[in-house]
Image: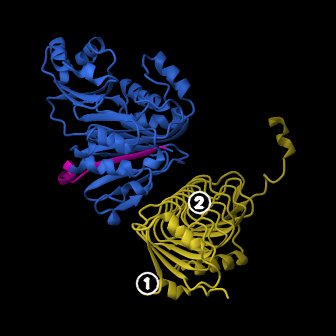
Chain colours: A yellow, B blue
Amino acid sequence: MPATPMSKAEREQGHAHSQASRVFDLSEHSLRELNQALHKLTPGSNETAWEVLNPKGSHSVAVGVDQPITIDVRGSVGYYCAGMNDGAAITVHGSAGPGVGENMMSGSIVIKGDASQYAGATGRGGLLVIEGNASSRCGISMKGIDIVVHGNIGHMSAFMAQSGNLVVLGDAGDALGDSIYEARLFVRGKVESLGADCIAKEMRPEHIELLQGLLDKAGVTGVKASEFKRYGSARKLYNFNIDNADAY
Amino acid sequence: MCGIVGLFLKDKALEPKLGAMLSEMLVSLSDRGPDSAGIAIYGAATGNEAKITVQSPKPDRDFRGLDAELAKAIGAPVGVAVKSTHAVIRTTPDKVDAAREALQTLRPDIRIMGAGEAVEIYKEVGLPEAVVERFGVRAMTGTHGIGHTRMATESAVTTMGAHPFSTGADQCLVHNGSLSNHNNVRRELIRDGMTFETENDTEVAAAYLSNRMAHGKNLGEALEGTLSDLDGFFTFVVGTKNGFGVVRDPIACKPAVMAETDQYVAFGSEYRALTKLPGIDNARVWEPEPATVYFWEH
């Protein structure tokens, strides 16, 4: 029988319930021990709540988790945290280095601080929430993931983004959505510049509804979906334009 | 890869610990580059003394009797403090050029790592731990410093290919990244009278800064120039007499993180480098913006 994921309320009280969670102190155990213990979990395991202490910028914390457990990481992490996550609810109570949530399949990742470059890169599903700022290349080549950033995002974000939704409550840097396919980008603040083939699009009722759902899912309050602008593909790069033949 | 660090102290009480703190930061990034490591430490400048850090492949031969011979050659008092393969030569500020010239004749194998009133530069092949141990960096006092651990990509693993590279009096540079137009820029700089010790790309960046400043630019302007004239990937950290500066190329794929408290400003290629600093849990931690020059000065 599959383990029941904890409700959001239970997750928020995770620290208070720490006697029930398995605590893993990275100042006493190696990263490999942690990740192997997480990989050994099977459906129906009772070890559904984990807490990781003293990450101190370690790389690859909680990569490749494929069970619906909760993991609270107490502190800041380095490269590739929670990569390939498939079903876990992972919260980093600090900031994350490059490549957080790379290629996530499902589940959720919440970063309480900032995230460095290429957060959520190539993600195929699930929800990545960054409560601070994300730097360059956020959501690069995203393929179905939903990303919600409370702050700003850096340059070249959503480059070649294929599907999924990127929601930014703050501003976006240069060349947003360059060579974008069918991902939807919602930005509340200003966009420094749009990349090739990325254009502003009309916010229709179905987009307001979709965006409101994402904001609710990410726990964003006090912000209306109508405050955002939508950006997406002009679809001009999809086919070769014969007028450009001379350039080749 | 490569790992770079910088630490600028605001709190004078930490100055005796600068060497230990900077060493810890650099050692934590050892797996970003195992080939060579180096550190530049800035002590308080007194105004009446200059230091020249030199390196020799045969320190026993080259440093023996050097103080007396050099003093005689330049007609000024000279002190020589030997640390393994390096030595710090102290003399009066007006005699630095004369001392450089005299060294070429007295000790042709000696290489000058850097010179100025405040800076000492130590660099060698090997892991950061071995390098800081060899030169006793942990015991050093200072106001600020920068460091580098190298994963070689562009040129040979040698002492002279290690960072920091001197860019002028009390100035030096460390680099994470690789430059793709360094051969062309080197040719242009040679035509303008610059000389080079290695095939290294970072040495070109250092010489570029020296050259621009020789043409009247200040360090900030010279760093701005790197954004248009150097092609490739770079995060540069430069040490100056009074502080340090940071600049990243516009693509900014080489990592960088900074932290500031009332006691210090710190730079690291990764957050790991900052985790042992005092009060880091409550520090303001951020990623420096691309194509933006940052400076902290006393």
Q: Tag on residue A230?
A: none
Nearest to the eye among marks 1 and 2: give it. 1
- Label 1 amino acid? Ser
> Element under label 1?
loop
Would you place residue B261 above or below residue B85 in this image? Answer: below
Chain letter for mark 2? A
Q: Does the magenta run of residues contain B6?
A: yes
Q: Could you tell me if residue B16 is visible in this image?
A: yes
Q: CA distance from mark 1 to mark 2?
A: 33 Å
Q: Earlier in the sequence, mark 1 or mark 2?
A: 1
- Looking at the rendering, which quadrant does residue B61 occupy? top left
Residue displayed at 46% across by 86% down: A13
- Looking at the rendering, which quadrant does residue A161 occupy? bottom right
Q: Position of residue A103 (x, y in %)?
A: 65, 63
Q: Position of residue B256 (x, y in %)?
A: 45, 51
Chain letter for mark 1? A
Which residue does the numbered mark 1 point to in the structure image? A18
Label 1 close to label 2 by CB (< 8 Å): no
User: Does A183 sit left or right of A188 as displayed?
Assistant: right
Quadrant occupied by the C terminus of chain A? top right
Q: Position of residue B74 (x, y in %)?
A: 18, 14
Would you place residue B294 above or below residue A83 in this image? Answer: above
Which residue does the numbered mark 2 point to in the structure image? A138
Question: What segment carries the magenta color?
Answer: B2-16
> Element under label 2?
loop
- Dot 2: few (<14), some (14–19), or many (≥20) neighbours within 10 Å? many
- Label 2 amino acid? Cys
Which is nearer the eye, B127 or B244? B127
